[in-house]
Amino acid sequence: MKKKLIWILAGSCLAAPLLMAQTSPPNPPAASAKAAEAPLVSALDGELFYQLLVGEITIQEGEPGAGFAIILDAARKSNDPLLYQRATEIALQGRSGDAALQAAKAWQQAQPESRDPNRYVLQILIALNRITETEVPLKTGVELAPAADRSLAISAIPRAYARVSDKKLASMVVEQALATYIANPATASSAWTTVGRMRLAAGDVTGALEAAQKGQAADVRYEGPPLMALELMDPKLPAAEALVQKYLTGNPKSLPEIRMAYARALLDAQRYGEASAQLQIVIKEKPDFPPAWLVLGSLQLQDNQLAQAQTSLQRYVTLAQQPSAEEDQARGLAQAYLQLAQIAEKRKDFAAAENWISKIENPDDMMQAQVRRASLLANQGKLAEGRQLIRNLPERRPGDARLKVLAEVGLLRDLKQYRPAYDLLTEASVKFPNDPDLVYDQAMMAEKSGQLQEMENLLRRVIQLKPDSASAYNALGYSFADRNVKLTEARELIRKALEFTPGDPFIRDSLGWVEFRLGNREEAAKIFAEAFKAKPDAEIAAHYGEVLWSMGQRDRAIAIWREGNLLNPENETLVETLKRLRVKL
């Protein structure tokens, strides 16, 4: 008797919040709140109250099936949405999908105008992998959404099907469910975008692009199609980029996030000049948009434009530190501080560099901060101390040991300590025998230390480990071309690299160099002109100028070399070329 009384008291505690909720429907309309309360208070009197209590106690006693039946019966008697929801969730917690679907459908039948039961039915059907049955609740869910929110409801559909195994079937079902909304001008663009995303998830890239194009045709101002096109951007699919450009051209006040994403896509494609142009537009249109300043500063630093990079990065720091800045912008502060420290280091202002590094407070960024400090020590003649600083770094995450090796190799490479770097990588290969990136770095250090056959062997191993490594194909092909050996194979290797990264100006530079070695000077000059336009760089300038020099176009050659010298007067290839040809700028 005592035990039973304890269970009743426990059940009362469990049921109390639920019962209280029945007497206070969430946000009832002011005019009908009192009228809505009265029937529920009455309905919960006596027998129904006791039924709920028994149901909750039964569940607590380890009989969820029986408790579910009691709560569902109470929901049907009271027609209360919270009881239907409770019954559905009891079944879900008991991993009974069929029972959960039964409760959700009963709720839906009792309250056909409510969005909640329909949402539960859809989610449960998807979880049960009964995809063909989801068409009706999916269509109903969109119909029940307020007209102002309908496009938003449509755009959320792909997330609901994200874990479905048969993506192709899901895509077909969604497209059938959205047929009415595809035909409606008010929702056509969002509907086509959702269809495109479902097709993309199913691996139908061509179909996804077609849907994006139709979505844009329905409404050129809607951002869904260009956002999807950004994911589809590929040299083999030029229509995707054309769609993005059409959106940006047709919407002078377009979202800066889309232009920013386009700039990042251009950077990924090694189209640095075009990316920089897009960033400049973002900054002009919205000067208080932090991400543009950070990426622009990084790009300027890469191009050795130190003054411009410092201005851009400091502007980012100012914006990211404002109270209104978003959290992800604040996280970029560490990157900005590290790059500002790098600028100061290049200027030999080591105190300023340390000052920037000291501003980094996030523990997740401490390894990068210490690596930057190690570089400062090395550039002040304290290489051994810098290496030891890196080696003393704690290894908190699985990849930290590998990152420490890469950091130490980078330190040695920057100081032209190629043989020690090679030896370090040889030692690391015991621990990381099949890491293509480490093998590639080892090959580069082998070349720098004069071990050319070892370099070739290592690069061929990288290609075995990572058959799509454009860097390995390019490095091996360029090495042959630079030494004027195996030129036919060199061209094949470089062309293979271009299949993986068609827009890379540095790989185009390698192709121009091998064509020059083969005696195809006109073709080489054309390739170099395109590469240098895409990426003004001192090494490309060195090769381009030499081809022009050999063709008798010496004034043009000198002009190109001067431009390269302004970009980086310390570039080894440019310095060697000018010395060999006895040219003074």
Image (tube, rainbow, N blue to C red):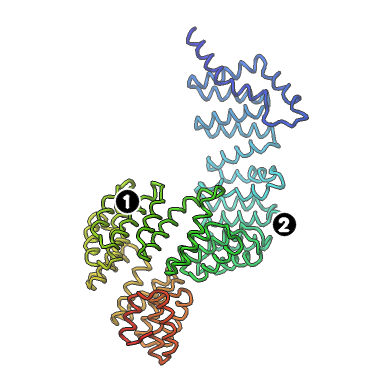
User: What residue type is disc 1 on?
Assistant: Asp
Q: Position of residue 359 (x, y in %)?
A: 41, 51
Q: Residue at x 51, y 14 (%)?
A: 7
Q: Crowding near pointer 1: few (<14 within 10 Å), some, many (20+)?
A: some
**Pointers 2 and 1 in contact (C-beta within 8 Å):** no
Q: Residue at x 44, y 79 (%)?
A: 563
Q: Crowding near pointer 2: few (<14 within 10 Å), some, many (20+)?
A: few
Q: Position of residue 419 (x, y in %)?
A: 22, 66
Q: On the picture, is 391 further left or further right than 1?
A: left
Q: Is residue 110 above or below residue 355?
A: above
Q: Position of residue 442 (x, y in %)?
A: 27, 64
* 375, 459: nearer the viewer: 375
Residue, disc 1? 400
* 527, 462: nearer the viewer: 527
Under tag 2, what secondary structure?
A: loop
| C-alpha separation, residue under disc 2 versus residue under disc 1 | 53 Å
Q: Position of residue 173 (x, y in %)?
A: 60, 50
Viewer can see residue 456:
no
Q: On the picture, is 302 further left or further right than 207?
A: left
Under tag 1, what secondary structure?
A: helix
What label does residue 185 carry, if any? 2
Q: Is residue 204 above or below residue 571?
A: above
